[in-house]
Amino acid sequence: MDHVIELERVSKVYKGKRAVDGLSLRVAKGSVLALLGPNGAGKTTTVSMILGLLQPTEGKVRLLGGDPREAGVRKRIGAMLQEVSVIDNLKVSETIELFRSYYDKPLPLADLLRISALESERGKMASALSGGQQRRLGFALALAGDPEVLFLDEPTVGMDVTSRQLFWETVRKMADRGKTIVLTTHYLEEADSIADRIVVVSDGRIVADGSPSEIKARTTGRVISFTAGERTSDDELRAIPGVTELSRSGRRVKLMSADTDRLIAELIGRRTDMRDIEIGSGGLEEAFQALVSKAE
Amino acid sequence: MSQTARATWAQCKSEMLRTARNKRFVIFSVIMPIAFFFIFTGTMNADETIDGTDWIPYYLMSMTAYGVIGASLTSFAPRIAKERAQGWIRLLRITPLPSGSYVLSKIVAQALINLVIIVLVFAVAGLSKGIDLPAAVWVESGLWIWLGGFAFMALATLVGSMRNADAVQVLSMILYLGMSVMGGLWMPTSTFPQVMQDISKWLPTYRVGQGAWNLVGGGHPDWAGFGILAAYAFVFVIISSYIMKKQEAV
């Protein structure tokens, strides 16, 4: 199989802390990979090393078979990075045209404006755009060179719900055109809806790697939630056989278990003080939290 | 044209467009020098001479230099700092645009901008006051100020390499006004006490002015001035490229 990205036991040490710790990863051509993890898990550091913006302390990184700093490689990639503001005193269309000039075979300006839904903003100063529009401009710039590999580092931060939906729809179209896409997010829902492969990262290490359904299956997520009586302690509940995870907000308690049928019988048998009982399948967020906390 | 040349030129054009749209640039590099010129040539006796040079052409040179220096320090330096702080340089590093092209386009754009300032201030002020100088002197003095502008671009690059973009704004403004006053661009150094005159001889601002003053007075710029400006430019470039290399090597 054709590997577009190869990381071999890559580590990055920042001021004595291992932000990325011996991470190995291969990404096949045409796949949509989501790097999923909480803030500070090392997702952005990993992407920065793949892009050649940071040099790994240990290990090897190959992008499109070469060094990411080579011009030949950079012609074939595009990226939306975090914390990149728009360039001042340039209009939207001028900014896009500038980026188009960097590439041999850029996408037409009209296409880029349409993809990023900025057609009616083309004559506006980029700095006058709203936060979500600026992110969409960033997306247009990432696509300017019609890249084979597209990196999206927390792309939907600062977008409202409508922008988000529109954005993921566009990304899905890009994926259908056979582009390899690497995105980072800390929302499992986003990863689940767009990616064909999810790599869960925590503390600079991979804690899970698989298709979205595999990832969800790994967390045998059924949940019993109820409002607990005042004298019910968390320790007491954790001690009940079958409870894999407990979370609480105020008096509302959530218990995760592989076998909720047996657990509910057990809870009733112990005369646990419970009201408003609900039993359901664990949400994606719970599944994700469970994966990350297991790694800890 | 090769791909890289095309990209460099596009980058260059955007830099010039951005500068022309920058209000700070227009105020400090075009409006202020011209306004100062009219105020100080209107209020002072027009027959006055400074070290044998007529006051009006003398002050035109001072203000043109002041505008060119302002372009580097009030718009070029903060822009470099801002582009770094806002992640633009990081984004450009993953595009095929070579970092050399980026630097080159900035220098070429700024050099062209400086040329426009010189022509504009010479034309507006020179024509309205009917300054009568041989064509060669116009060209030579303009060229001298333009060359001197490179030392200030180098200084702006150094100041712009500081991490804190707000500090860059403040520091470049202090350097701009301080060195302009101390270098005798506002008032001739001959009005200063001896100690300040001795200091000003070492300032690049004085040296840019001095070459042009000599030319319009019928003389030649001295080589010491050229040497001092070149030395400043050299030192600033070396230090700023060292700092930028160090910051990039993460």
Image: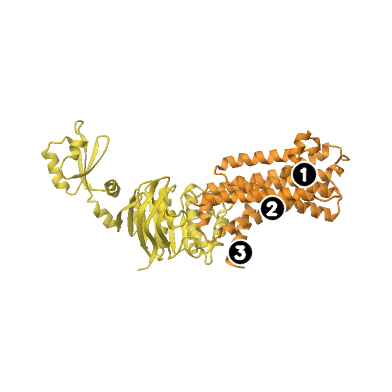
Q: In which quarter of the image is the N terminus of chain A?
A: bottom left
- Distance Cα–Cα, label 1 vs label 2: 18 Å
Tell me if residue B173 comes above or below residue B105 in the rendering. above
Q: Which mark is residue B62?
A: 1
> What residue is shown with label 2?
B113
Q: Which mark is residue B5?
A: 3
N-terminal label among 3 and 1: 3
Q: Can residue A279 be seen in this view?
A: yes
Q: Which chain is yellow?
A: A
Tell me if residue A276 comes above or below residue A82 in the rendering. above
The residue lying toward the viewer, choosing from A45 and B34, is: A45
- Distance Cα–Cα, label 3 vs label 2: 20 Å
- Element carrying mark 1: helix
* Chain letter, disc 1 residue: B
Instruction: Classify residue B88 as left or right of residue B117.
Output: left
Color of chain B here?
Answer: orange
